[in-house]
Image (spheres, rainbow, N blue to C red):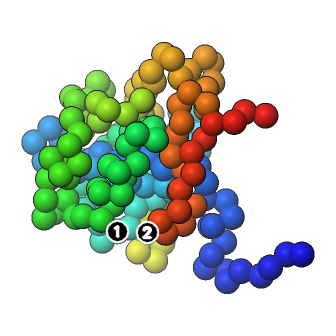
Amino acid sequence: MKITLKPEEFYHLINHGPCCIITSGDEKIKNVAPIAWITPLNDEPPLVIICVASSHYTAELINKYKEFVINIPQVELLDVIKTTGKTSGRKKNKFKLAKIIPEKGVKVNCVHIKECIGFIEAKVIDKKEYNGVILYVGKVLHCEIEKEVYDKYLITHRAKTIHHIAKDKFFISGKEI
């Protein structure tokens, strides 16, 4: 038996990709925010899309600096996701609050998070706003992943990435079939 959902709940059915942590700004002015609405757009050229509420500090910084980093956390960083998702970077230093270490970008001026298993650096090449949400298209300039969780593909049972379903509901990757 199937149940009917409200149209506004559609994303609960397809939004179980990894919840990542976006870093934005530069080395002096920096912010961190969990974002679950991320998708690859193309592989040649390598393009990625992130969706950010236009009112958020993250959007302000991405609009100003035209770049961002997608940090890929593992299950041990679930509290970082929860902590950084409840606080505005306009008011507090979320790196200090979450006790995470910023590291200098490789191809961008934006920092990445040392504790994450990987990161993707991107330069904004396009954006479009839809009813208070900005869809940013970024060209991937550099990416890294811990060797032990990657062998031509992400080894999900080792990576143990965090997946956001809705509200305060998460699950962990781990079983390949």
Find out whether the residues at labels 2 and 1 contact each other: C-beta distance under 8 Å. yes
Q: Residues within 10 Å of mark 2 (few under 14, many from 20)?
A: some
Estimate the x, y position of residue 170 in percent, counting from the top left: 53, 56
**Tag 2's secondary structure?**
strand
State the residue position of label 2.
133
Estimate the x, y position of residue 47 in percent, counting from the top left: 52, 39
Which part of the image, by quadrant, shows the N terminus?
bottom right
Is 91 situated left or right of 160 in this image? left
Q: Residue at x 67, y 80 (%)?
A: 7
Estimate the x, y position of residue 35 in percent, counting from the top left: 43, 55
In this rendered view, identify the residue nearer to me: 142 or 2.
2
In this rendered view, identify the residue nearer to me: 114 or 140.
114
Give amino acid for label 1.
Ser
Quadrant of res 5:
bottom right
Q: Residue at x 46, y 77 (%)?
A: 131
Residue 174's label in the rendered image is none
